[in-house]
Amino acid sequence: MRCPSSDDDRRDDYRELTLGRRTLRSAAFRLAALLCAAGAALQPVGAQQDSGLQVPAADRSVEQESDRARRAQRSFERIRRSHFPRSPWFSDACDEQVGRFCLNHDSDDEWAAAPEHPEVTERRGWLLATLDSVARVVQGDRWLLGQRVKYRLEAGRATETLDLLADCGATEGWCLALRALTLHQERRHAEAETTYDRALAAMSPREQCAWTDASLILEPQDRRDYRRLACGSPARRAFERAFWHLSDPLWLVAGHELRVEHLSRRVRNELEADAASGYGMSWGADLEELTTRYGWPAGWDVAWRRTPGVRTERSIQAHRPPEAQRFVVSGFSRRDRESAPIWDLDAAKPRSTWSPPGGPVYGAPYQLAAFWRGEERLIVAAFDAPSELENCVARSGLFLSNSFDEIHRTEGNGTLPLQVLEPKPSGAATLVGIETRCVDGSGAARSRTALPQTGNLLSDILLLDPVEQLPGTLDAALGSARPHSTARSGEKLTVFWEWYGGAEASGALAVTLSLTREEKSLVRKALEWTGLAGQDEEEVGIRWSEQGGTAASDNPMARAVELQLPQLAPGRYRLTLQVHSVGAGTVTSPKEIVIEP
């Protein structure tokens, strides 16, 4: 029985592939192809060698040499598939149908890539030697150049790849795209993005539209709004600019990493469209979509399952890194412009994921507060690294941004509180980001939220840990600022704020500090509805009077008070500072805190 070649493999319509948290499964696999693949795996190495790996004769034609390169590439991928490690896992679950495949978002956190089989490593070297040999005869061929780059990057030979591309020989756009792919793999994201922009500029408008299309990774509402915009129009360019800025995993890292990754996946689709691969089947719109959404597999294995009767099914499983995360932003389309963007790094069923080479990104606990300095606001952030980053040397940043660009930043070492002065005009920034990343290891943490709105008479509340002496200035308060907005039931904490009332707001000030429950259990709501429990939500509060003086925003009146929390039920509470003066009336400053057991 003739074993199917790579071209025959493209007619196989049964494969099952698992992508880390995602399983891709199609419908049927011919028993003949299965038996041939199993038989090929048992042949000695010499018997599997393809004649396409022989040194070419000097008089072979360009067509013959091109065919030899393609046969060598198919032979290598067959050998790669024959050495996939065995896996006992086989899943029938399906969360989403994508063409011939079925996606399963089940967790695969325990999966780890097995070392590559030595024969695969050796045969890749032979393949590269063959492709390089063919390139001496077949010059300027797009497919051949792409395969020479692809397999060099697989082998970790990025420097050699850049040297190869220095004298590229193919079209300018393709050469630049391959160079950008290499720079991206080397984690030189800013250079890669600039190079991709040059590659796009060298393409036709139609090619630019295909390469920059982001619809496959957008959430449904954003995708509908995006597809209504004409490609190349100012409205679509504005949409893409906002999307890539807000979806950038870390503003601390130069360049839009996720945009570079998206364009690199576009290059991968071009490389695989007319080549054999570990999937063992023809390339199509479904594989193009899956590669665009989730990238290229991080590893492969094979599982077998016997079904009723005599049929045995072979499942090729392609894994994604377990730490792959969802970075794409949602909720920023035209009808949602008034609401804050939404980020969910660990969504259960993500539309698209990526595993940054710098390690996973965690949520960062933080506390934000705004204070006035003249006519400008000073944004203060106290934060901490999550437990996963406790032992690393950290670099941190505080960012003010709008939907399109970063407006201002300040950086520092470690996790000391950071502050940044909001530039004029006031209101230009709408978002604030806090980030910290390991510079000597793997991992990062971040939080992004809407910029707080602050009145011009009263600052935000800043929570402090208990102190021996109450601080009289903001600088003194920052030394004991809490890196989060949580507290334990019965704990003592310090509340700090500033008052900016001028002469018109001078005189006696009536100050109230209260803590109210923002959410209630169903039992509590039922008791209140029946009248068995009162509806007064205030759990704790204090009131006092003091002289306000003539404080101004450039010389504020700083105040701090200790607050002893009673035994409160865990949940979300609103801490409200209220100041009343004869000249200014009543102004308030709220802060949400979480009470933990």
Image (cartoon, rainbow, N blue to C red):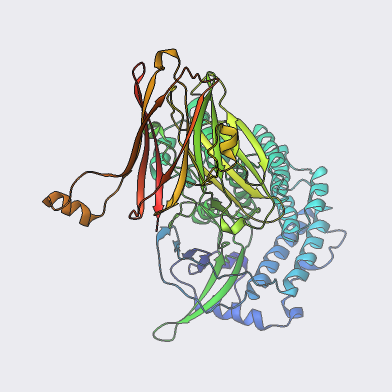
Work out whether residue 115 or residue 313 is closer to the camera in this orientation and state it.
115
Q: How many marks?
A: 0
Q: Quadrant of the C terminus?
A: bottom left
Relative to residue 326, is residue 333 drawn left or right? Answer: left
Write down the quadrant of residue 203 in the picture: top right
| Residue closest to the far bottom | 310
Residue 414 vertical placement versus 212 (above, below): below
Residue 406 vertical placement versus 35 (above, below): above
Residue 254 showing in the rendered view: no
| Residue closest to the far left | 530
Relative to residue 374, is residue 167 drawn left or right? Answer: right
For image coordinates 62% across by 33% down, the residue present is 409
Q: Quadrant of the N terminus?
A: bottom right
Relative to residue 556, is residue 509 drawn left or right? Answer: left
Residue 193: x percent and y percent? 67, 39
Residue 581: x percent and y percent? 36, 21
Work out whether residue 180 or residue 338 is closer to the camera in this orientation and state it.
338
Residue 357: x percent and y percent? 65, 54
Residue 266 vertical placement versus 47 (above, below): above
Write down the quadrant of residue 391 in the picture: bottom right
Write down the quadrant of residue 567 in the picture: bottom left
Work out whether residue 216 or residue 486 is closer to the camera in this orientation and state it.
486
Work out whether residue 348 or residue 164 is closer to the camera in this orientation and state it.
348
Residue 253: x percent and y percent? 65, 42
Residue 409 showing in the rendered view: yes
| Residue closest to the far top | 504
Relative to residue 137, is residue 562 drawn left or right? Answer: left
For image coordinates 55% across by 53% down, the residue present is 362
